[in-house]
Amino acid sequence: MNQNFMQSKLPPVYKQGRQDAYLDPIRQKLILVTPEETVRQHFVSWLIDELGVPKNRIRVEEQLSHYQKNLRGRADIIVNAYDTDDETFYPVAVIECKAQGVSLDDKAFKQMFRYADKLNCNYCALTNGDELFCYHLDGKDDVALDSFPTYREMLRGEYSPAPIEEPPPRLEFDELKTFYRKYVDDGIIGDATPETLQIPMTNFCKCLLDVEHKLPARRYKIFRLVKDYGIRNLSVGDSSGGHFDSAYRSFIVEYNGNTTFVSIAVSSLVRWSSLTTAFTAINVAVDRGEQTHNSLELVVDDNVEVAGNRIKIFHNWKLTNGNKGAVSPVEVNKFVIERYPQIRHADRCFLGALTHDRLWTLDDSEVIPVIENLISYALIRDDLRAILR
């Protein structure tokens, strides 16, 4: 969206002790200056000066329970209309703000839509100051907008849908030999990873992002694939306290009577022992309630072997159980093999092999067992974590 509300003016700043504070025009009090508050204040100013929203129709950091009893949560910005019949305010738009540099991941979008649904709003928006996503909601479809409407347009129920963009065509196989450098420059593929792995990992990443091809929905060895959900932008934590902000290919699976998301992405990985170079990882994340964590962080540089055009994916059984630290690889080996023996290869965990002579897709006969093994291995690893917790 091309609307740049970050150019709008900020309210006056005053000292509050040793800290700076905005004089908030809506709450009419001093609010400490933070990166998120700066985005919020820019948006409020833009609503008033550019979109014609009256000040007395805006609420900031508003408890949802003020609109409906027992609702939980607090919205960043709510735009209200006034019902002259019963002389009450009612919400027409809710805006969620994040600090600049914060990833607008799937969790943030879910929060925005959840608040809009609870408030019965027709419009909602999510922004981090750099990106702005707006939607019109009518109870059936969520329509992405190409601009945030003016106050008058909101009251009339008007909106301008964003044009539907066709996904770009896949690269030709031979183009991977040069394209992979873009993924290295963008930090998706690690710069320390050998070129013999960088190119096939670019192919694997493109395979995960190709929504034209889907993993077949069926019963696999230990889980049932309910749906190949497509792409979710996730910010996923790991055991060291870091986060991977990536586009994950997500799958809804039924496992041991529960339904959850399992998601796979390729991303660069910086080790504490080498803060100037990055390696490459295949991350497999599992949703645990509303939280998502990387169950498997497979470092490609250590675990993937290349022999000609054959790519073999192994794992060293390493597992970290939160702040309890590392679990013995022998214990992991024993636990996993008892439940999923087909991935044992001598003393190693073998997750599959791919022939690098074509573009891979999720419905490729070689790719399917690799994805099945990655999902299964991640689920069983979380079973072990639950037992040891």
Image: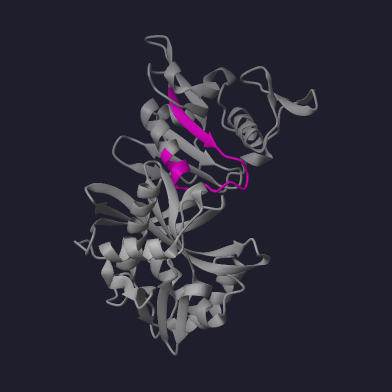
Residue 88 spot, x, y in % from top left: 42, 12
Residue at 80%, 27% in the rendered image: 18
- For the residue pair 329 and 368, the one nearer the viewer reads as 329
Residue that lies at the very extreme toward the bottom in this rendered image: 308
Residue 162 visible in this rendered orientation of the protein: no
Position above or below: 54 against 252 = above
Instruction: Report the quarter where the C terminus lies.
Output: top left
Position above or below: 213 against 4 = below
Residue 28 spot, x, y in % from top left: 66, 17
Residue at 40%, 37% in the rendered image: 113
Residue 102 falls inside the magenta stretch: yes
- For the residue pair 145 and 269, the one nearer the viewer reads as 269
Residue 271 spot, x, y in % from top left: 61, 63
Residue 338 visible in this rendered orientation of the protein: yes
Relative placement, left or right, of 275 versus 140 is right
Relative placement, left or right, of 181 versus 331 is right
Judging from the image, the colouring scheme is one colour
Residue 148 spot, x, y in % from top left: 51, 39
Residue 151 falls inside the magenta stretch: no
Residue that lies at the very extreme toward the top in this rendered image: 86
Instruction: Name the image quarter holding residue 311.
Output: bottom left
Residue at 52%, 47% in the rendered image: 323
Residue at 43%, 80% in the rendered image: 172
- For the residue pair 239 and 228, the one nearer the viewer reads as 239
Which residues are drawn in magenta? 91-110
Relative placement, left or right, of 229 versus 267 is left
Residue that lies at the very extreme toward the left in this rendered image: 219
